[in-house]
Amino acid sequence: MLEPIRTRARDHRAAFYIGLLLVAAIYVALCASLDLGILDHSPYDSYTLQAMAWRDGRIALTQDYSWLEIARFEGKYYISFPPFPSAPMLLLSFVFGENTPSRAVSMAMVLLSYGFGYAIARKRGLARAPSAFAAAFLVAGCNMAEYALYGGVWNIAQAMAFALTAGAFAAALTKGKLAAGGSLVLIACAVGCRPLQAAYVPILLTMAYQSLRERYGRRALRELLPLLIAPALIAAAYGLYNYARFRNPLEFGHTYLPEFLESEFGQFDWRYMGTNLRNILRLPFIQDGRLSFPTAYGFAFWLCNPMYPLYAASYIMAEIAGEARARDRIVFASVALHFAATLCHKSFGGVQFGTRYLCDMIPAMYCFWLIGRRRGRIERGVTAAAMVWAIGFNAYGAWWFHQLVR
């Protein structure tokens, strides 16, 4: 009996590592083709600037940086982004100083997201090879393949939020009190990278409660309450930090950027929705005999992030079959709310390949796209083709975009 068990364990590891190597190979190949060093420090890495200021006992910067998004408030200069990614950069700064390996941090988030994606797929009942394929699709079959190529403040924040949100859902699918608490801590950290990730707090609270109820029955709520302390303290830390900088516990700093101060409607407004929606429905085009794309404010989000049509089709079919549960509906509502809120953002990611802001919803959709519903052969074939397409399309698009803008 021992030999078959060992063989299965080796097969399990083999599937995981083959997928991991595929993702790493895509990333390294893109970096090599674009002459990007994996260990390079990015001049747009605001998080290391913040970490170095912390080391000096300051929260404000000593000067303005014209090429960065620096908030100016009451005569001082502040990093205008949520603070959580500065914590790992602080640790790295004790080894590398101010030249932290920014791009390597983004790459680490890609690989970590793959690992969480694999764990989610396995917990959803997929076999080893399909789990590795699904996890590779999760990170390489969306705009993460492009935005994680760099180590700027935007790249690190979004890649870290993606990984932490995927980790939160992986933990939520794991039985046990520690895992339930860990899922809530991880989503709290994700909010400190991208605040709109708070849209998934309700579903993760629901999943934590349901997991505890299976073990503790009527005592589940009493067991859940202590698990809220750590994420509440993390949220309180954000609020205090924001108040110390901007006299507002909910203000991370973007409001005080010139782009939004000079805008009639500010950073977020429902009146941006129409323009953003039109932009993200634009199609690629042929230019000089080569497939090309709009380079600002997004395009055909369903082409570069096929998780959207795959998830939507899976959810609708589950509803039609009567297999959708309450928490499936909660996550669908959370994704829709997050999507709508993102459409209210003025810049919508600016210059980019694809629609990178819409990657923030993908970990949640991925988790519930992998519902254990029986799929027909045709549906499985279409899904596999879409996944292969997504990986190839995003690899090409990332290469094309950075050849154009670098």
Image (cartoon, grey):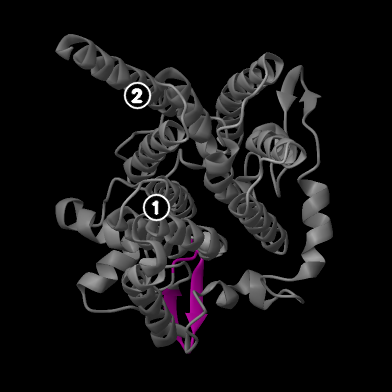
Amino acid at pointer 2: Phe
The residue sitting at 70% across, 46% down in the picture is 296
* Disc 1, SS: loop
Indicate the position of residue 156 as horizontal and vertical percent values.
Answer: 42, 51
Task: Classify 124 as above or below 248.
Answer: above
130 left or right of 362 in image: left
Is 84 situated left or right of 330 in this image?
Answer: left
Q: Is residue 67 shown to the viewer in this render?
A: no
Residue 313, labelled with which disc?
Answer: none
Q: Is residue 7 visible?
A: yes
The CA span between labels 1 and 2 is 34 Å
| Corner quadrant of residue 44 | bottom left
Residue placed under numbered mark 1 in the picture:
43
**Disc 2 designates what residue?**
16
Q: Which residues are magenta?
A: 65-78
Quadrant of the image containing the C terminus = top right
Mark 2 nearby-residue class (10 Å; few <14, some 14–19, many ≥20): many
In this view, the residue in front, 311 or 376, is: 376
The one of 364 and 400 positioned closer to us in this rendering? 364
Q: Are marks 1 and 2 in contact (CB under 8 Å)?
A: no
Q: Indicate which disc, 1 or 2, sits on the residue closer to the N terminus.
A: 2
Classify residue 282 by image quadrant: top right
Q: Is residue 158 left or right of residue 346?
A: left
